[in-house]
Amino acid sequence: MADGLTSAGTTRRGTVPVRWRARYRTIPWWVRTAVVYVLARLVTGGMLLAFAGEQPANSFTGARPSYLSFASIWDGAWYRVIATGGYPSTLPVDAAGHVTENAWAFMPAYPFLVRGLMVLSGASFEFVAVTVSLVAGLGAALVFRRLAGRFLDDSRASFATLLFCVAPVSAVFQVAYAESMGLFLLLVALLLVVDRRWWAMLPVVLLLGMTRPTGLAFAFFLVLFLGAWAIRPAWVRESEPLTLRRLVPPGVVAVVSGLVGLAWPAIAWAATGVPKAYTDTELAWRSSYIGWKELVPFAPWVQGFGWWFRQPVGGVLLAVVLIGFAAFVAMPAARRVGLELRLWGVAYLVYLLAVFFPQSSTWRILVPLAPLLGIVALPRSRVYRVLVVAVCIGLQWVWLYHCWWIDGYDWTPP
């Protein structure tokens, strides 16, 4: 018998990975996903602890805070205010009469859930808030894997899920932020769209719109989806044309999502008596960059790139970013992830262009684009996959250093 060959004609060296892959595939997908998520959180948790060990005293914590204290700074402090004291009935203003930063910038579902669990358990805000984020993040990873599996084979879907768990801003899965809960609800809603379970989507979009400000973006996404279905059913994997009967369920969901997107500004108005309470509060966060300006749709990104890079360089860079994104979602390989996920990416980016001012929290705000990781996961090269994971973990450290960790006067909130 030739050296290195078995009687079955396969190399002894080759039987190990073959047997490993066979055993790996016998493990249920949800177990594999949970293990990957937990391991990823341990890696990120180690980074957070390392930064906490070097953290000087600051406006949120003392020097070298515990993990839970360190994981509850920045927006976590605002969620603590809401969970323990609710929203202000009177808006704070500066000497010039401008509305200053306050709790109305944050949606209520996450802090109210945390408050309820605090009352039931008697546990601290930090413990409950971080636990809710961790559990919601696990749920998001499981739903993400199921959603990716609707379009990709097992290997690619699993790798996309790994990227989801180790993404550069995946630390938000284990801090006192609403991103985990919002992403879980968003992925559930997208999965229901893919499965055409329209009526089951209603409670999800209601809660989603009260967790993160994505109601208008999701309504716009459904409009794009219905437009694609009307133009060419095959684009959305439908064999029948869009009729009035088929239009009603998704149309109702789109209307409800849009109304939920407008509900929070209306609630802020009703509670404070100030018609623009919500938008003026949001504008307070960008005033330190560009001063006090009215919200003009689609102006913030032009203003932001102009502030960061000066014009005309900012305008050119913005055009490059938008063209690059369009090329990314339109390239032939991207079709494998389904038009629904790509349309969501387009809808959400248009929403951000309309209302969001790009600054240090931009990377966290881009988290809802996570379904597009399926495109990044398409190449099968092992070298490529190892490199991408290594880059993601390295960028986690970069993000924590520049955005989360506080070094003196810090103007880069995550």
Image: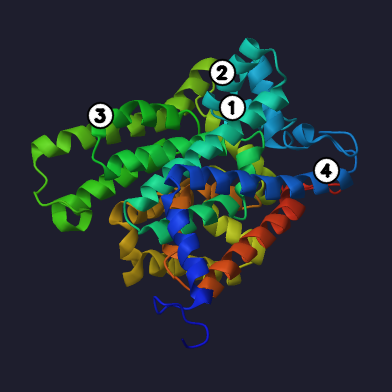
Q: Please state the total of marks drawn on the protein image.
A: 4
Tell me residue 320's x, y (percent): 49, 71
Which residue type does callout 3 highlight? Answer: Trp
Q: Amino acid at mark 1?
A: Trp
Tell me where residue 332 appears, x and y as whole percent: 31, 71
Mark 1 vs mark 3: in front:
3
Q: Which residue is mark 3?
A: 199
Q: Amino acid at mark 2?
A: Thr
Q: Which residue is mark 1?
A: 104
* In front of the other: 195 or 72: 195
Disc number lying in front (2 or 3): 3
Residue ID at (39%, 37%): 188
The reply to whether the C-beta atoms of the residues labelled 3 and 4 are less than 8 Å apart is no
Q: Which residue is mark 2?
A: 272
**CB-based contact (under 8 Å), mark 2 and mark 1:** yes
- For label 4, the residue is 52
Taking the image as shown, residue 36 lies to the left or right of residue 160, namely right
Mark yes or no: residue 30 visible. Answer: yes
Report whether residue 292 is seen. Answer: no
Depth-wise, is mark 2 or mark 1 nearer the camera?
1
Q: Looking at the image, which is closer to me, 283 or 188?
A: 188
* Separation of marks 4 and 2 at Cα, in angstroms: 38 Å
SS under mark 4: helix
Residue 50: image location, x then y, percent: 82, 48
**Comes first in the chain, label 2 or label 3:** 3
Q: Which quadrant would residue 247 be assigned to in this image?
A: top left
Mark 2 neighbour density, 10 Å: few (under 14) some (14–19) many (20 or more): some
